[in-house]
């Protein structure tokens, strides 16, 4: 009988202990950072012959996905995947995509939308009769869709990287899944090289400023933790990131105590300006505000694990180390790789001209 | 007759009963017909237009093996049979489970405001689901899913906890149960808040569960939940006499030969089982368990022999219709639709009752 009195406290403590363990983020990152067996080294040496289908691949959630034949009708459920598919030359095979605030390239705008941020319209996907669906993981709202599509015998590949290496591995995986292995491998190699060059350039800077990246300040200050893809990008760009906690927030006191030297406005697209930042109570004393080092940044470029991640890194370096801006953009790699990316009205992307895919 | 029994009966006697009420069997037949119509409508409607005649043909082919001489694409068949039908049938099952449980809780606890979640089931299920989201992704046997399995376990665990804790204390058993349910529910809600804080980017998944919905419906989940819900409901329906006794008060029930302690434990246990099975496949959908039994009582009076089966039918109709409306209105959460239907009805009900409420 005495033992029963301890049952309740033990159960409650166990519940609280389980609730306190840091969350499911570990599972996608573990899968993403493990290099796939078919990945880097082999493709770097010499272009491999086109893969023969059927092929069985391991996606970012560790599920084995078998693709019977080269996919001709692809549904892309993440914006990064849409960009990657167009860049490697599979763009005309996309029959459905997820809604994207910034359609890139412009041809992507013409593709019918079958999913939005808050969910996938499974019926629309099924009626398009796709032979490959590339999706984000369970952490977003696409988990049910993945399950139901797999039950309907549609191959679903989960590509949801949360690190830069994961992003490159994802590009290679998409290449293998769609039969555009050479283009995808070339893209990944080019990105890797360019990122290394930019890292080396950033390392030549004289200082390593403390950087605060503002995601949103309505209803609390939201900033990414240093172990996110943001953190990786900041470290590569030669900055000292001020980290948020696991739920992407930070208190104003901590921020003032950390005293950022550069403030990056990830919410610039929503109308937040440098003047507005200076007007906020309590922010005036920060070094960044006094020196006027507040810069708008395109949040999508910094986080989307697609071909434009390199542009995001360049933008970060420009904002954090203005003295290096004169050396950017870096000269295009000789023997440029990949299919042509059309003019968007912005400066030509780093990919330059891309020879026709094999 | 005192208290709630009187109140519940007064609703029926205080106004002219429609003639249907004297023929509960006719009402049941009507409800069955309505249920059939609503199920077919639910399967026929969705974001992809499948012609109704094709829908019926697909159903006839897959369910009855009939060939009606029409053709359809494989995609249409997948949509109708693998996506919509399990969803509609799951909604029906959840509607049955929640209404029967609601009717039982209202009867046993003699509280017209009691809904299936009154003993902390909702908080327990939500905490179970949140814990499942925090753990690495694992699928339980039978493809049921870790989230749904832990939600079921959490719901039952919460009720067990409440029941054990309410055995002490000097209050009446019912008051003790309700108050303990509230306290444990609050504690588990705090645990849920902590889990949501720790979940980081997986917050959306937990939130999707809290809002409730049938997006994750599948044949496996339906086949697992249906026997539990139907079995518990049938066992409760057998005990309708005891439930009627409870309406009169514990002393009167005891005098009528009802084994109060045993029947209370059995009825609450079965109702909690039905609720746990329902919330494990659908998330937390409110108002149906509260409102459906009341509407049925307005029609046929408080006799549990009629209220229980009719609540089951009416709850099923309500839930399938709410899911259909939610899908057609742009995939809004089902809980929003049930609240929009249920809350005004409940307010109207409150205004009409002349005798007022007492415990």
Image (tube, grey):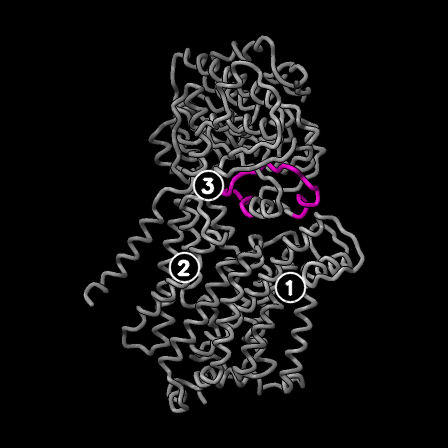
Asked if the magenta segment contains residue A133, the reply would be yes
Identified at 51% across, 34% down, the residue is A58
Chain of the residue under label 2? B
Q: Is residue A18 above or below residue A35?
A: below
Q: Do the residues at discs 2 and 1 belong to one chain? A: yes
In the picture provided, is A40 more to the left or to the right than A17? Answer: right
Q: Which mark is residue B321?
A: 1
Mark 3 element type: helix
Magenta stretch bounds: A123-144
In the picture provided, is A195 more to the left or to the right than B19? Answer: left
Q: Quadrant of the N terminus of chain A?
A: bottom left
Asked if the magenta segment contains residue A156, the reply would be no
Residue A275 can be seen, yes or no: no
Q: Rounded to the nearest whole Å, what is the CA distance between mark 2 and mark 1?
A: 28 Å
Pointer 3 and pointer 1: residues touching (CB < 8 Å)? Answer: no
Mark 2 or mark 1, which is nearer to you? 2
Mark 2 element type: helix
Residue under pointer 2:
B153
Q: Is residue B351 above or below residue B186?
A: below
Q: Which one is earlier in the sequence, the residue at label 3 or at label 1?
A: 3
């Amino acid at each position: 009988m005495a033992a029963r009195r301890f049952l309740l406290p033990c159960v409650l403590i166990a519940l609280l202990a389980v609730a306190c363990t840091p969350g499911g983020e570990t599972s996608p990152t573990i899968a993403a950072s493990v290099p796939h067996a078919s990945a880097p080294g082999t493709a770097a040496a010499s272009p491999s012959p086109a893969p023969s289908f059927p092929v069985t691949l391991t996606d970012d959630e560790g599920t084995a996905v078998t693709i019977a034949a080269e996919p001709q009708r692809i549904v892309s459920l993440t914006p990064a995947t849409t960009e990657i598919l167009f860049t490697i030359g599979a763009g005309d095979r996309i029959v459905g995509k997820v809604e994207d605030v910034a359609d890139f390239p412009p041809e992507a705008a013409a593709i019918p939308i079958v999913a939005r941020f808050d969910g996938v319209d499974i019926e629309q996907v099924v009626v398009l009769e796709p032979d490959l669906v590339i999706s984000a993981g369970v952490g977003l709202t696409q988990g049910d869709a993945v399950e139901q599509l797999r039950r309907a015998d549609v191959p679903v590949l989960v590509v949801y990287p949360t690190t830069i290496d994961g992003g490159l591995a994802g590009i290679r995986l998409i290449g293998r899944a769609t039969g555009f292995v050479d283009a995808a491998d070339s893209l990944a190699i080019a990105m890797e090289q360019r990122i290394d060059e930019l890292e080396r350039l950033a390392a030549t800077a004289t200082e390593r400023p403390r950087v605060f990246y503002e995601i949103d300040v309505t209803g609390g200050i939201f900033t990414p933790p240093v172990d996110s893809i943001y953190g990786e990008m900041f470290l590569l760009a030669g900055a000292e990131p001020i980290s948020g906690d696991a739920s992407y927030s930070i208190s104003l006191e901590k921020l003032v105590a950390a005293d950022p030297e550069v403030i990056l406005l990830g919410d610039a697209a929503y109308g937040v300006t440098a003047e507005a930042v200076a007007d906020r109570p309590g922010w005036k004393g920060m070094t960044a505000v006094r020196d006027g080092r507040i810069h708008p940044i395109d949040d999508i470029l910094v986080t989307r694990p697609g071909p434009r991640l390199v542009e995001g890194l360049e933008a970060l370096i420009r904002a954090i180390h203005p003295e290096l801006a004169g050396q950017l953009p870096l000269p295009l790699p000789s023997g440029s790789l990949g299919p042509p990316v059309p003019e968007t009205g912005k400066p030509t992307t780093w990919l330059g001209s891309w020879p026709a895919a094999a | 007759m005192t208290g709630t029994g009187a109140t519940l009966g007064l609703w029926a006697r205080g106004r002219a009963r429609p003639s249907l009420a004297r023929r509960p069997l006719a009402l049941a037949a009507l409800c069955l017909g309505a249920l059939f119509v609503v199920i077919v409508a639910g399967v026929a409607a969705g974001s992809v237009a499948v012609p109704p005649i094709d829908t019926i043909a697909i159903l006839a082919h897959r369910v009855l093996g009939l060939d009606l001489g029409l053709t359809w694409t494989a995609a249409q068949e997948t949509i109708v049979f693998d996506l919509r039908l399990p969803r509609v049938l799951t909604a029906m099952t959840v509607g049955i489970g929640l209404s029967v449980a609601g009717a039982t809780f209202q009867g046993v606890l003699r509280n017209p405001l009691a809904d299936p979640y009154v003993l902390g089931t909702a908080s327990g299920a939500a905490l179970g689901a949140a814990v499942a989201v925090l753990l690495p992704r694992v699928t339980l046997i039978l493809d049921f899913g870790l989230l749904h399995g832990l939600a079921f376990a959490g719901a039952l665990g919460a009720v067990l906890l409440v029941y054990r804790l309410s055995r002490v204390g000097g209050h009446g058993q019912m008051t003790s149960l309700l108050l303990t349910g509230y306290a444990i529910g609050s504690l588990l809600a705090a645990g849920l808040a902590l889990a949501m804080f720790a979940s980081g980017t997986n917050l959306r998944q937990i939130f999707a569960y809290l809002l409730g919905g049938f997006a994750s419906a599948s044949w496996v989940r339906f086949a697992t939940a249906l026997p539990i819900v139907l079995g518990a409901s049938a066992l409760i329906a057998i005990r309708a006499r005891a439930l009627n006794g409870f309406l009169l008060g514990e002393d009167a029930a005891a005098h009528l030969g009802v084994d109060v302690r045993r029947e209370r434990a059995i009825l609450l246990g079965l109702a909690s089982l039905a609720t746990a099975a329902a919330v494990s496949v659908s998330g937390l959908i409110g108002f149906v368990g509260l409102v459906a039994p009341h509407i049925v009582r307005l029609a046929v009076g408080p006799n549990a022999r009629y209220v229980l089966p009719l609540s089951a039918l009416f709850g099923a109709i309500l839930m399938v219709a709410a899911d259909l409306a939610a899908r057609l209105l742009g995939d809004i959460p089902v809980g929003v639709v049930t609240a929009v239907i249920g809350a005004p009805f409940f307010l109207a009900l409150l205004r009409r009752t002349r005798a007022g409420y007492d415990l």
